[in-house]
Structures are given as structure tokens and as C-alpha cells.
Amino acid sequence: MPDTAPRPRVRLRDVTLADADMLDAWDEDRSPYNDFGMPRDPIDRDAIARGPLRNERNGMMVIERIEDARPIGTVGWHLERYGPNRESGAYNLGIELVPEYRGQGYGSEAQAQLAAYLFATTDVNRVEAATDLDNIAEQRSLEKAGFRREGVLRGSQWRAGAYHDLVYYALLRTDPRA
Ligand SMILES: CC(C)(COP(=O)(O)OP(=O)(O)OC[C@H]1O[C@@H](n2cnc3c(N)ncnc32)[C@H](O)[C@@H]1OP(=O)(O)O)[C@@H](O)C(=O)NCCC(=O)NCCS
């Protein structure tokens, strides 16, 4: 049988020290959906030098376009707990693409890959993402990545001088993958 699966166009890779200046520059220009008005600290170069920016609590990777090895954005994740036991942990992910690389499907691929990576390397049952109710691109991107829409947390996020409704999406280990 010929393999008809579409070839991946992006991959996720660990952050290196060579990325540090680029990531600081990107941070100056982050999208309003990821801008909480907090001080912009330079990325922790000592932490990068010590090893990959990922552990059981959180992580960050660079999204790289495969055809030219160009870094086009970042994904990150952190552990959320829905109960005091280890089994009730879930990973909540976030993403930011450089503006010129948005709207080409890279975001859906990257988020599907991150979910697959977290299911493969941990025993977590749930990977989730929350986004502003107005952020249609991220909602559609998550749906294309196989995430299911679950509900709205009204007035849950303070950003840009107002409270915003967040819509939650999740992929369970047992859900069909995109
Ligand atoms: C959100 C983001 C990750 C999505 O990744 P992306 O590669 O741009 O998105 P994709 O190309 O995979 O999919 C976007 C989809 O939303 C659709 N879309 C985009 N804007 C839309 C709008 N205003 N109304 C309706 N649909 C819209 C696109 O048509 C596309 O759907 P389609 O493929 O069915 O046509 C990326 O745009 C980004 O980094 N945005 C800024 C940061 C951000 O918002 N991060 C999430 C914060 S929670």
C-alpha cells in the first residue's frame, strides 16, 4: 500500500543557546493574545545551557519549518492539576507563530505534534489548550489538530485592560488523532 499520509512540514526541536537572541526579539513582538502586560525578561540562557527547556512541569520548543530549517515560532506547555494525585495532571499548551508564518496550517501541525509528543513521552491522559473566544484562528487550528471544544470559562483571563472569556479545547489519549 502506498503511504498517502501528508508529509509533516514542521518539526519541534529543543531550544538552543543559538536561539536566545531570536526568542528575545520575538518576545518583543508577541501577539495580543499572548501579551499579559508583564515585564519582558530575557530568556534564561543559563537554563538553556543546563539542558533542554522541558521537565515534568513545563517545557518549550521551537517550531522549525522542515524545508529550510527556519524557526517559525514556539510551543510551550505546563502542568495543570485537576486533583491532588499524579494521575489528575494534564498538560496545557500554548503557541505563537511569527506573523508571516500564520494562516498556512503550520499551527495545526505543531499543536498536533506537541500533543503526540506529550502522549508518547508521559502518561498524561489529557492535553488541553485555552484561547480567547475571539481567537478564531487558534480555535480552528486546534480543531484541525484533533482537539475537541469543551466549553467557555467566562471572564477568566485579564488582558489588555479587560476580562476575557476563554474557550477550552482538549485531546484525550483515547481520542482519535488528526
Ligand atoms: C493561532 C495560531 C497558532 C494558528 O496557527 P496558524 O498556522 O496560523 O493556523 P492554521 O493555518 O493552522 O489554521 C487557521 C484556521 O483558522 C482560520 N481562520 C483564521 N482567522 C479566521 C477568522 N478571523 N475567521 C474564521 N476563520 C479564521 C483559517 O482560515 C484556518 O482555517 P482553514 O485551514 O480551515 O482555512 C497562529 O495564527 C498564531 O500564532 N497566532 C498568534 C498567537 C496566538 O493567537 N496564539 C494562541 C494564543 S491562545
Image (tube, rainbow, N blue to C red):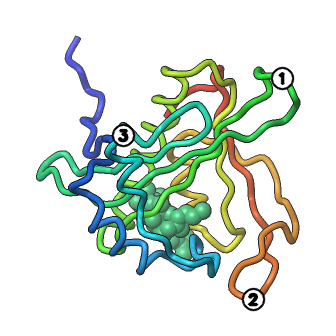
Q: Nearer the viewer, residue 1 or 28?
A: 28
Which residue sits furthest left?
Answer: 68
Marks 3 and 1, how far apart at CA = 29 Å
Q: Secondary structure at mark 2?
A: loop
The yes-or-no answer for disc 1 within 8 Å of ligand 1 is: no
Q: Which mark is residue 121?
A: none
- Between circles 2 and 1, the one closer to the viewer is 1
Question: Mark 3 is on which residue type?
Answer: Arg
Marks 2 and 3, how far apart at CA = 37 Å
Marks 2 and 1, how far apart at CA = 36 Å
**Which x, y percent locates residue 114?**
47, 38
Residue receiving disc 1:
85
Tag 3–tag 1 contact (CB < 8 Å):
no
Q: Secondary structure at mark 3?
A: helix
Residue at image coords 74%, 41%:
80
Q: Along the polypeptide, which appears first: circle 3 or circle 1?
A: 3
Question: Mark 2 is on which residue type?
Answer: Gly
Q: Which mark is residue 161?
A: 2
The yes-or-no answer for disc 3 within 8 Å of ligand 1 is: no
Q: Along the polypeptide, which appears first: circle 2 or circle 3?
A: 3
Q: Along the polypeptide, which appears first: circle 2 or circle 1?
A: 1
**Which x, y percent locates residue 129?**
65, 50
Q: Is residue 9 left or right of residue 107?
A: left
**Which x, y percent locates residue 137?**
53, 66
Q: Is residue 28 left or right of residue 85?
A: left
Residue receiving disc 3:
50
Please, is residue 6 above or below residue 164 in the view?
above
Within 10 Å of the Cα at label 3, are there few (<14), some (14-19), or many (20+) other Cα atoms? few
Q: Quadrant of residue 106?
A: bottom left
Residue at image coords 80%, 27%:
88
